[in-house]
Amino acid sequence: MGSKTALVTGITGQDGAYLAELLLNKGYVVHGIKRRASLFNTDRIDHLYQDPHVENRNFILHYGDLTDSTSLIRVIQQIQPDEIYNLAAQSHVAVSFEEPEYTANSDALGALRILEAVRILGLERKTRFYQASTSELYGLVQEIPQTETTPFYPRSPYAAAKLYAYWITVNYREAYGLYACNGILFNHESPIRGETFVTRKITRAVARIKLGLQDKLYLGNLDAKRDWGHARDYVEAQWLMLQQDTPEDYVIATGEQHSVREFVQLAFGEVGIEIGWEGQGVDEVGIATSGLSRAVYGKYRNPVVVAVDPRYFRPSEVETLLGDPSKAKRQLGWHPKTSFRELVSEMMREDLKQAEKDELCRREGYRTYDYHE
Ligand code: NDP
Ligand code: GDR
């Protein structure tokens, strides 16, 4: 049997990059859909890039967009994939309140467009489909911990769009016999996590504060609790779901929960900065009690390195999420390999390297990127 062919939407994203690498290591020919941008947006997969002028490539990118059926049908027709991983999405919960219609178009209808493309092209018996579903479906949680049977209660336009995608995936499985699965993945992070998600925002800021490139980290809800795992472990589960005899839906999580405040504390601890907390609610601040340079302590007696900014509060918040991955452990043999502490440590290490480069550039008189979100 020749090598399998996979199509990954969202290949330029965090999960797309890890999954592409995993599939290439397993001998797949990997096709990815990327959308057109005014700048190159392939940083995360540049190490996998192959010159289009070379023959027999096993990593091939196509332009396309989840909001454009024509591009999806064309690419799927050309590739005739054995497996499709639908990872593309407007994936930021807070942004979905600002762009609800676009979020519904890409995240809800995008999944439908791919499923229909498979059907229109008569690939129902050939092509297996993975949908990137999310713990955000549980929203206002109805049961702790959350399992495959916990009722959903979405709390954002993002979650409502993903709810449609979840059910349309189930429906195409039941109506047309498609091998289609939902992975209900809890938050997973990595050094290549988008900079505006809370974990990466924290590790990036902590590194920059340590090196004197930034004074303060502004955050929203410090009490939010999440079940955080490593993206590298979670893409393994995505692949496993498409290798079974029957298609089913699975919760992927660590079964352990931490607050945003704990994440902050641990991240600062990684670079030897100790934090004391003062105040409450919007007035809560994190004060560095040791570990900053003498110059900083000379300037401020009590350097406030963390402050709450209500602009990061969400119109309706998901306060707490905790997953139960027992089914995935039992049926897929999947286990999370990276502990919370290792995750924070790895992210801090990589962001420190980046901050060191920025610091060097600044010292040598080059402008560096100072954008904070
Ligand atoms: P990212 O935001 O890092 O990546 C999203 C990808 O989707 C990017 O490649 C992006 O392209 C692409 N994309 C966005 N809109 C479109 C569009 N209209 N057409 C085509 N491509 C588009 O997300 P993650 O890698 O973290 O997550 C992968 C998937 O898993 C997403 O669907 C997300 O909602 C879901 N998910 C993520 C979890 C997590 O904790 N990471 C947990 C549960 C679910 P570009 O690079 O051009 O922006
Ligand atoms: P989430 O991730 O909304 O869970 O969605 P995010 O990291 O954005 O937020 C986690 C929690 O932290 C709180 N928070 C902040 N969040 C951000 N982004 N910025 C802040 O400054 C900040 N301060 C506090 C949030 O309120 C929230 O409670 C992610 C995405 O990857 C989704 O695509 C995915 O479906 C879910 O995880 C599972």
Image (cartoon, helix red, strand yellow):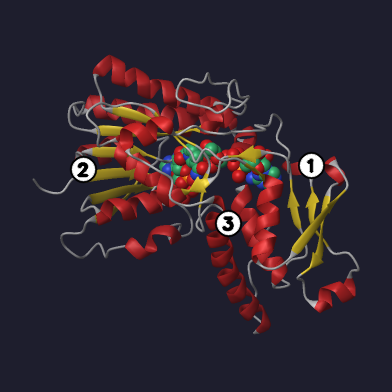
* Spatial separation of the CA atoms under disc 2 and disc 1: 47 Å
Q: Does the residue labelled 2 lie within 8 Å of ligand 1?
A: no
From what the image shows, is residue 7 above or below residue 57? above
Whole-percent x, y for residue 174 in the image:
30, 16
Whole-percent x, y for residue 357 in the image:
58, 75
Q: Is mark 3 within 8 Å of ligand 2?
A: no
* Spatial separation of the CA atoms under disc 1 and disc 3: 25 Å
> In the image, which disc is placed on residue 79?
2
From what the image shows, is residue 295 above or below residue 215? below
Q: Name the residue under label 3.
A: 344
Q: Is residue 304 left or right of residue 371?
A: right
**Residue at image point 63% right, 66% down:** 369
**Residue at image point 21% right, 37% down:** 77
Tell me the amino acid under the disc marked 3. Answer: Val
> SS of the residue at dot 1?
helix
User: Which badge, 1 or 3, comes first in the chain's sequence?
Assistant: 1
Whole-percent x, y for residue 6 in the image:
25, 44
Q: Is residue 373 visible?
A: no
Tag 2–tag 1 contact (CB < 8 Å): no
> In the image, which disc is placed on residue 310?
1
Tell me the amino acid under the disc marked 2. Answer: Ile
Direction left: furthest residue: 1
Front position in the image: 88 or 294: 294
Front position in the image: 275 or 63: 275
> SS of the residue at dot 2?
helix
Front of the two marks 2 and 3: 3
**Residue at image point 39% right, 30% down:** 327
Q: In which quarter of the image is residue 356?
A: bottom right
